Image (cartoon, rainbow, N blue to C red):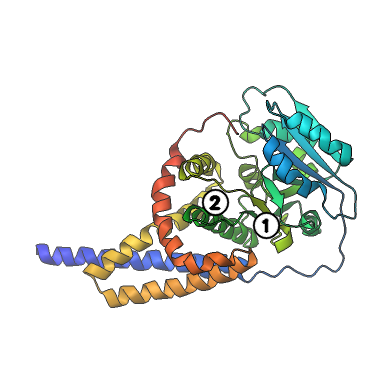
């Protein structure tokens, strides 16, 4: 009887493995394929809007010296401005910006010399930057980001159409040698595969502040960040989670519309960065928490259940299920990596996908951690 009970348990485990694999396949076949085969609709009429680019900086003199020129020299035929909010910097930021302004007349500098009590993170300086903006279309990026081309501004505003109030872009990382660079870039790609695909499926849930655009009127109509001021991060993902919907959101993934950032140099620095970002997930809308949680859980369980099913049930059936998932995943990854200019990662995708099991083990505890009170 004990043996039969054990056999039944392994059968149950195999059925759970089949269910997990099916759920994973449904995500790839129904949701993620939307990015893989995405083709932007041809616009009958195109309009060039006035744009306000907003960058918040705190002790970012080195990054601004390197990256700000890429924003200031954008090829843009319409009215535009670049607002840099210098938030209580103690380095040479103020003097550097003054030097830039001598050459670039469209640079608007806002110097903040005080903190906003009870509002952690960069929501306060960003709110001030938005209030100072002269134009309805806001384009946000960070001091450590540089546009991939001089057409970034043009491409991002091109995604606006009738009813569009939010445009989600892709913020990539510079390609550098080393394993850590591949891990960081794959995780960034994997996150983009989710938020861009969900947006195309009519369920937008986040954007990244490295490359994000929305309308000034939308910001004020929703009382800015007032509902999320108690959260350290969230000036990008939580705000979008609250205001974006299937009717007012579009994406822009043209190669010229990508921004590039310098990745962390050590695993410890990356770990601290990701822990800070993960603390906002608990504040997403319930439907988003459920769908993202279900995907993450089944992604995490897939490989352990595959191994156990292959050992204790039938390795041939288990291998067949693995191959179906592997082929589906490989096709979606290849097409999506081509879309996001991450083609070099494809040769490593199967190892990087296995790495995601370890990734979940390392970073999942951050979902329950209390965030610290700084944003730099």
**In the image: residue 116, left or right of residue 334:** right
Q: Where is residue 213 in the image (x, y as percent from the top left)?
A: 74, 49
Figure check: 124 above or below 209: above
Residue 7: which disc?
none
**For mark 1, what is the residue?**
246
Q: Where is residue 182 in the image (x, y as percent from the top left)?
A: 51, 57
**For mark 2, what is the residue?**
288
Quadrant position of residue 48: bottom right
Quarter holding the C terminus is top right
Residue 118 visible in the current orientation:
yes
Figure check: 45 above or below 368: below
Mark nearer the N terminus (1 vs 2): 1
Quarter holding the N terminus is bottom left
In depth, the one of 26 and 170 nearer the eye is 170
Q: Which residue is drawn at 61% across and 40% down?
A: 234
Does dot 1 land on a helix, a strand or a loop? loop
Does dot 2 land on a helix, a strand or a loop? helix
In depth, the one of 116 and 173 nearer the eye is 173
Q: How crowded is mark 2: few (under 14 residues within 10 Å), some or many (20 or more)?
A: some
Q: Which residue is drawn at 82% across and 67% down?
A: 43
Q: How far apart are marks 1 and 2 (CA)?
A: 13 Å
Q: Position of residue 261 (x, y in %)?
A: 64, 49
Quadrant position of residue 302: bottom left
Quadrant position of residue 198: bottom right
Q: Residue at x 70, y 35 (%)?
A: 61
**In the image: residue 37, left or right of residue 47:** left
In depth, the one of 347 and 100 nearer the eye is 100
Q: Residues within 10 Å of mark 1 (few under 14, many from 20)?
A: some
* Outermost residue, left side: 1
């Amino acid at each position: 009887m004990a043996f039969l009970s054990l056999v039944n348990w392994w059968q149950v485990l195999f059925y759970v493995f089949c269910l997990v694999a099916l759920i994973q396949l449904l995500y790839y076949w129904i949701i993620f394929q939307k990015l893989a085969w995405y083709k932007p609709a041809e616009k009958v009429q195109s309009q060039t809007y006035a744009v306000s680019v907003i960058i918040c900086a705190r002790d970012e003199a080195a990054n601004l010296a390197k990256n700000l020129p890429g924003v200031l020299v954008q090829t843009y035929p319409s009215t535009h401005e670049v607002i840099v909010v210098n938030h209580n910097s103690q380095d040479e930021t103020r003097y550097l910006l003054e030097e830039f302004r001598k050459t670039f007349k469209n640079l608007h500098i806002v110097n903040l010399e005080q903190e906003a009590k009870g509002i952690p993170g960069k929501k306060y300086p960003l709110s001030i930057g938005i209030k100072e903006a002269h134009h309805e279309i806001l384009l946000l990026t960070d001091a450590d980001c540089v546009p991939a081309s001089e057409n970034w501004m043009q491409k991002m505003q091109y995604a606006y159409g009738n009813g569009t109030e939010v445009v989600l872009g892709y913020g990539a990382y510079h390609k550098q040698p080393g394993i850590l660079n591949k891990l960081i870039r794959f995780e960034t790609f994997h996150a983009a595969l989710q938020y861009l695909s969900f947006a195309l499926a009519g369920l937008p849930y986040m954007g990244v502040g490295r490359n994000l655009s929305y309308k000034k009127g939308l910001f004020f109509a929703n009382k800015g960040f007032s509902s999320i001021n108690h959260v350290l991060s969230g000036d990008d993902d939580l705000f979008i989670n609250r205001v974006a919907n299937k009717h007012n959101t579009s994406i822009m993934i043209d190669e010229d519309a990508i921004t590039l950032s310098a990745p962390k140099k050590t695993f410890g620095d990356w770990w601290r960065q990701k822990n800070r970002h993960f603390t906002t997930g608990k504040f997403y809308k319930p439907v988003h928490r459920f769908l993202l949680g279900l995907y993450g859980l089944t992604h995490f369980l897939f490989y352990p259940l595959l191994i156990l099913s292959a050992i204790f049930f039938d390795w041939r059936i288990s291998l067949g299920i693995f191959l179906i998932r592997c082929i589906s995943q490989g096709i979606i990854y290849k097409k999506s990596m081509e879309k996001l200019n991450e083609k070099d990662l494809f040769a490593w995708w199967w190892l990087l996908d296995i790495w995601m099991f370890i990734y979940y083990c390392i970073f999942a505890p951050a979902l329950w951690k209390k965030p610290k009170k700084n944003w730099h």
